[in-house]
Amino acid sequence: MTPEELDEIAESERAAQSQFTEHVNVCVAAGCLSCQSQSVKDALDQEVSRRGTKGHCQVKGVGCMGLCAEGPLVSTSVVSTGLASTGAGVLYQRVQASDGEAILDGLSGEPVSRLICPTDIPFFQRQKKIVLENSGVVDPERIEDYIAAEGYAALIKALTEMTPREVIDQVTKSGLRGRGGAGYPTGLKWSTVSKSVGTKKYVICNADEGDPGAFMDRSVLESDPHRVLEGMLIAAYAVGASEGYIYARAEYPLAVKRLRIAIRQAERIGLLGTDICGTRFSFRVDVRLGAGAFVCGEETALIASVEGKRGTPRPRPPYPAMEGLFGEPTLINNVETFANIAPIIRKGGEWYAQIGTEKSKGTKVFALAGRVQNTGLVEVPMGISLREMVFEIGGGIPEGRKFKAVQTGGPSGGCLPSDCLDMPVDYESLAKAGSIMGSGGMIVMDESSCMVDVAKYFMDFCMTESCGKCIPCRVGTYQMHRILTAIGNMSATQQDIKMLEELCDLLKHTSLCGLGQSAPNPVVSTLRSFAEEYRAHVEEHRCPAGVCSGQLAGETV
Amino acid sequence: MKPSSNVKTLNIDGRDLSGRQEETILDVARQNGIFIPRLCEMDGLTDVGACRLCLVEIKGQNKLLPACVTTVEEGMEVTTDSPRLQNYRRMILELLFTERNHVCAVCVSNGHCEMQMLAQRLGITHVHFPYRYPKEEVDASHDRFVIDHNRCILCTRCVRVCDEIEGAHTWDIMGRGIDAKVITDLNQPWGSSDSCTSCGKCVHVCPTGALFEKGRSVAEMLKRRQFLPYLTLMRKENE
């Protein structure tokens, strides 16, 4: 594969696509697939063949369009001969297989008004797409489509025009920080690995997304797997690695399938393998499946799991950058981090650094879930306020209820109350407010949620997912869960609250890995911001939100 | 660089000490008679840093670090004992006592148990967390040995000694979190294990009465661990 050959593929693909004047894109990512988008696509395909318009009407399966709550989503656009598309395309929501005919009719006439999804709402307008630029646009199972959308151009640029040092410099300049949650500067990590000495180096993509309610990485992998591969390839070139692994959850079969297709396609045209692009850079990638343990998202546990061992963390240092997979220097980044790399190399680190806040650059993909009108996947610039996220992009709380809290960072994060609404969403602000950025799950809660119950839910999660290696996490999460259950049953005392606080402190400071250290966060943050609710449970034996059953309420008074 | 530059000087509890760069804080402390509590660490086995009892304070470090896996550094200032550390250690031990059924009065290791001794040393007079009282099994299918899961603290010394020293890898861990337990082979009864060589190393490294020899009554199970440093030393010399 040479740069010229890549251009050729892009050109011929664009030429092939320009034959089509009508484009119908059907979302085939997990969200829409689960509400039968495949049958919608099949119906559209059949209808197109029946009408004999196959020559100029293209029905394409594409990745996530974001507004998963209204799926299946279908977008259409019409190109008048030789010119750009006539006006904006139309987005249809909640499309059924039986709507195929109407949608195709709508291409030449009036759009189907009953299905139209308004795209002038903040949900779409406030987004800035970098990671998701191709989601909903390219066919995730065709490398040609990705190449036509400037795919692999960044890799070619890095390989042919830049030294590894220059690649790392651009990533450092971009200010990109790890999107897995902790926010470690990506450029620094890359340069550490590049300077580490080993007989061999590895690049690992952490696709073990396990936070409840989070599906950013899943969506990226299902919608645009080549972007992640390209990011890994550039990283491997920069740090001098020759082998890579994508550690994906077995619970994401579609993402795994599309990744495998992507790897095969890239190998076939010589973008993966030996002597890529006529250079001496060689890289191969393999997919490893997780067996369902949340803790395997922790990097040292992940490495153990890839090595075929039991997935338990080990103390750091040594960090994987020095001693990682099979004892060799290893670069581990999250899916979304890798997905940011290609645009950074294409457009330069300075371009990326213009977006976001002073210390948190670029955009972040959030999985907006819970009690908001518009649930789904959004990519916004760092520094946007929580209020904008919930009330503008999210469209506010349904059924006229009152906002209570937003939970970020999953089981390692915290609940932010309404007085945090005007806080900017970036790594530092979230940490200061007692939560974390996390991988990007954002769960909105209204007054019908009981914060004790929320804390209990996350503690239950941590207890079940604790690997059992260190004592504070193994037994501490059990004891904390027991106390939270007692509070929910209205059988707890003030003594229990004190014990809960003690355990929070113990776990935070003595647990071996991030799972245990951050497991108290949901409890600490709710104890701080919603102490009144805890008090009501303990002293008055009532649940203000009416969630906790409190079977013992009458007896203990 | 001269080999001598591999020696680091550090300060532990106000004493100026020295250690080779590959030695851990715990190694140096042990050589100098400074006691740091630990239950999973054992000289001669790889360190896992799992029990969290050997956490120490290091000046200039926000985090508490496990002495068993933290190597010495030049100018390091270590505090191995402080009210805060004592408090954490007591809580961790208390959690261990609540986890399974540790009843010293009927235990073969009563009086020789590392956990019991540590509790006494740390001045634990009672446990303020409620006990779990789980139903755990006792596997007495082996000819000579017994595993009583009620007394197991999941330190994994048996797993490591079997894998690293005996080379049999009969022991391993099954399950996750509070449900984790040590197993022989693929969770077969110990007596039917094909891989077990009946060497008994696991029994003697076990810090509690979880692993013991058949026929021992209360307080009769003395553990002999001298073989471990001896074996590791001999093997090193043969390398």
Image (spheres, coloured by chain):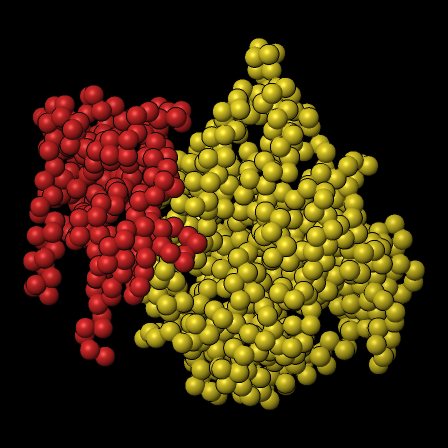
Chain colours: A yellow, B red
Out of A382 and A259, give the one closest to the viewer.
Answer: A382
- The x, y position of residue A448, in whole percent, is 71, 32
- The x, y position of residue A279, in whole percent, is 47, 87
What residue appears at the point 65 percent right and 52 percent down from the top-left corner?
A: A367
Q: Which quarter of the image is occupied by the C terminus of chain A?
A: top right
Classify residue B44 as left or right of residue B74.
left
- The x, y position of residue B76, in whole percent, is 32, 60
Res. A329 image quadrant: bottom left
Count of picture labels: 0
- The x, y position of residue B53, in whole percent, is 31, 43
Q: Quick check: can you spot residue A431?
A: yes
Q: Quick check: can you spot residue A243?
A: no
Out of A232 and A449, give the one closest to the viewer.
Answer: A449
Out of A224 and A44, give the one closest to the viewer.
Answer: A224
Is residue A238 depicted above or below B214 in this figure?
below
What residue appears at the point 43 percent right and 57 percent down from the top-left corner?
A: A299
Classify residue A381 as left or right of residue A83.
left
Out of A89 and B5, give the one closest to the viewer.
Answer: B5
Is residue A386 depicted above or below B74 in this figure?
above
Res. B108 image quadrant: top left
Q: Give the farthest residue toward the front.
A: B14
What residue appears at the point 85 percent right and 58 percent down from the top-left corner?
A: A120
What residue appears at the point 42 percent right and 50 percent down from the top-left corner?
A: A513
Is residue A189 depicted above or below A113 in this figure?
below
